Amino acid sequence: MADFGEPPASYGFQEFADDARQAAPPSPAAWGWRGRVRKLTGGLVSPAAGQEEAHYRAALAQVQAGFTGPKTIVFVNPKGGAGTTTSALMAARTFGVHRGGGVVAWDNNETRGTLGARGMPGPHMNTARELLDNIGTFEDSATARIGDLGLYLRSQGAAHFDLLASDERPEVTGHIDSGDVARLHQLFQRFYRLVLIDTGNNMRAGNWLAAVHGADLIVVTTTIRQDSASSALWMLDALEKGLYGPGNLKPRTITVLSEPAESVDPRLRATMMNIFGSRTRGVFPIPFEPALVDGGVINFDRVSQRTERAWLIACAAMASAL
């Protein structure tokens, strides 16, 4: 067989492979009057995308960007009703749809959380407890497959992520501890690119602290309410003093600020934007969304385009921070 070897420098291969080669031209506009002009002229007139569409495309590219390894995002606020579960689900759906999967949302509540109740049901009722009972099957075997996790996780269909519910059996006692969190986290890092963790309300619980310790990014969730904001700020104070030290928390934290009603106090909103903007990398507002307020299983098809785009912007910031 002939030995072709490396082509000589004059062959032209280097010019073709050079990172400086011409990039693909930007796609023409698809939104608004620009998109209509392009459609009506059959592409003969193709205006560039407007500012809003260009912003959307930049956010989409950031969400789809590759990571250097598996990454973990933890959603936190010790006050109930502050949006941690909804935020974890919407972020999982946003990343899952636009990245094509590789995402798991995990309810790391020490007892019973609500992530499983708000996600699509699966063909089984298994939860984190059953997975922990059988986790040795995955830890002790190099041949364990992601498909085998289907016995314990719940596929979320067109949302392109998997969900691990917290323990749902009323007769069972005991808690998920820090060691359990470490084992589950290590397992998920083997099979998923993004691990999104919904947390409970007890900041002193071992599983809560273990999740925060293992996070690449902390997402503070709060609604535009004084009690929700106060709880989040108290938590940030505690984390900075007890775990990270002054100035070390802000670079790894962002805030998602959700509107709890159709009408909110604009002064309170502005105050919260300023306060959390000084305490975290950035604040990303999420509009009031009727499809998310009933507390039942979320039908992502009913979520408004406005809310979807707000979550894309927020998730782009998370991806950038990672």
Image (cartoon, rainbow, N blue to C red):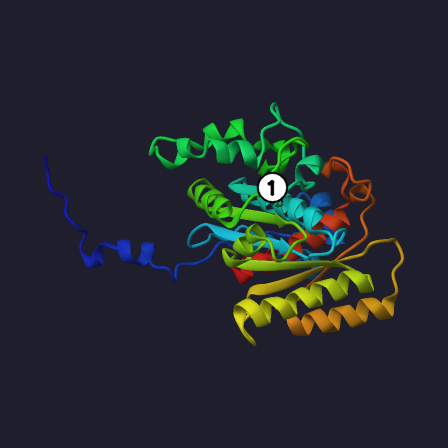
Q: Is residue 95 visible?
A: yes
Position of 96 with respect to 15 (left or right) is: right
Q: Residues within 10 Å of mark 1 (few under 14, many from 20)?
A: some
Q: Quadrant of residue 105?
A: top right
In front: 294, or 308?
294
- The amino acid type found where label 1 is placed reads Val
Q: Is residue 313 above or below residue 39?
A: below
Residue occupying the point 59% across, 59% down: 218
Q: Is residue 48 visible?
A: no
Position of 125 with respect to 25 (left or right) is: right
In front: 237, or 160?
237
Residue 100 placement (x, y as % from top left): 54, 40
* Quadrant housing the N terminus: top left
In front: 86, or 167?
167
The residue at the far top in this view is 123
Q: Is residue 83 above or below residue 234?
A: above
Residue 260 placement (x, y as % from top left): 82, 54
Residue occupying the point 18% across, 55% down: 8
Figure disc tally: 1
Q: Disc 1 marks which residue?
A: 97
Q: Callout 1: helix, strand or loop?
A: helix
Residue 223 placement (x, y as % from top left): 77, 58
Position of 244 with respect to 3 (left or right) is: right
Residue 225 placement (x, y as % from top left): 82, 61
Residue occupying the point 17% across, 51% down: 6
The residue at the far bottom in this view is 246
Q: Quadrant of residue 167?
A: top right
